Image (cartoon, rainbow, N blue to C red):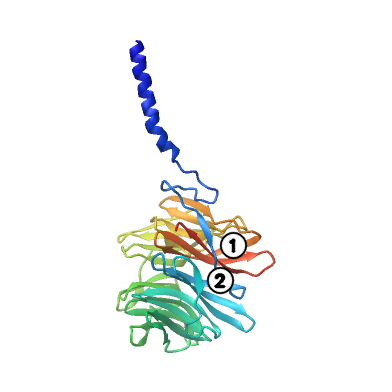
Amino acid sequence: MNGLRAVVVCLVLVCAAVVSPAAAVTPSVPSSAAVDVPSAVSPSWSALPVPAASPPVTVSDLAARGRSDAWATGYEHTADGLRPVLYRWDGTAWSRDTAFPGAGEPGWLGKVQFVGEEVWIFHNRDGAGEILRRSAGGWSTVPLPQTLSVYQDFAAVPGAAWVVGEDDTGLKVLHYDGSAWTTQSTPDGVLYLMGVTARTTTDAWAWADTTAGTTILRRDGTAWRDANVPLPPNSNVHTILLEPSGRVTIGGSQYTDGAARTYLMTFNGRTWRTSYPPLGDTYTEAMVRGPDGALWLPVRSDRAFQSKYARVDGKRTTFSYGPERTNAIDVKPRALARAGSSLLAFGTVEIYGAKPNLMSERLGG
């Protein structure tokens, strides 16, 4: 019996020795990390310094191509009016670019697109629209064929670009094929195009206000047509994500009993699926597909001194907070982008006693 007891004790000690090292490396989740811990180590958000502009500043867009090439756009409010602002991330730090045409003139910068090896940016240059193009040889411009009273959105892919807006005669869809501009027509009943995006020259999408309500349009290279997307009733659209895999994700708000709630729709190539994650009435324009495969977007924070982000992975929604900012009374990430294996955020922060200026944060890196 004593021999048997000795064998049992030895087995228990061996098992404890095997289990203990694994238990010892279980990570502790910091207060600023996401509630969800998808891997052995859950990275947290960190603050990135941004050279100041003339506050208050408005952020338009952020786009990244790999971990060391990202661009953020917007405009600053100077004594002489609006001035465009452009920042570049090189993988280590943000710097301001003032070498593009019209940098010191009235106007603003809008959406950023990567087209082949070039960077394309929509530029309102003192009322006239143009596309800024940055290549290895420097900056150049592509002027629009006409001036619009409203420049609503811009999209570009290799071989094509679209600018949507309005002039005195109504809705305008301007198309650039790499050499010349043409005007494209939309289906009857379309009153206004709120946004446009594209995957290829023959696969472009837009969301429109029509006589029948909000509608998704799709262009197959020949004409814009109703895509027959079964949007929730009494809803609008904030953004459409087109992914190389063919997956499409739509984000917007549905109004029910006088209140708005966020919805997400995903198309897998065959069917649309609609979900209502617990995001309140979050505006989903900044939504991106993160390096972890989940959807990420900034949400309204319940802490004035910290930003807040939502991670939506299927039916599970979790939240994380950015770093604490001393004396901050409003931290607003305006845009998100995947930068390699990390996420970049760009927006504004208002410090007590000062006007909103620029901020940036990174998850991972």
Q: Is residue 233 visible?
A: no
- Which residue bears the numbered disc 1? 331
Mark 1 is on which residue type?
A: Val
Name the disc covering residue 51, or none.
Answer: 2
Mark 2 is on which residue type?
A: Pro
Q: Secondary structure at mark 1?
A: strand
Q: Nearer the viewer, residue 2 or 158?
A: 2
List the single residue furthest toward the right: 353
Q: Quadrant of the N terminus?
A: top left
At x 50%, y 81%, the residue is 150
Residue 71 placed where, x, y %? Answer: 46, 72
In contact (CB < 8 Å): disc 1 and disc 2: no
Q: CA distance from mark 1 to mark 2?
A: 17 Å
List the single residue furthest toward the bottom: 146
Q: Quadrant of the C terminus?
A: bottom left
At x 33%, y 14%, the residue is 4
Q: Secondary structure at mark 2?
A: loop
Residue 358 in the figure: left or right of residue 228: right
Q: Nearer the viewer, residue 297 or 112?
A: 112
Residue 236 placed where, x, y %? Answer: 48, 66
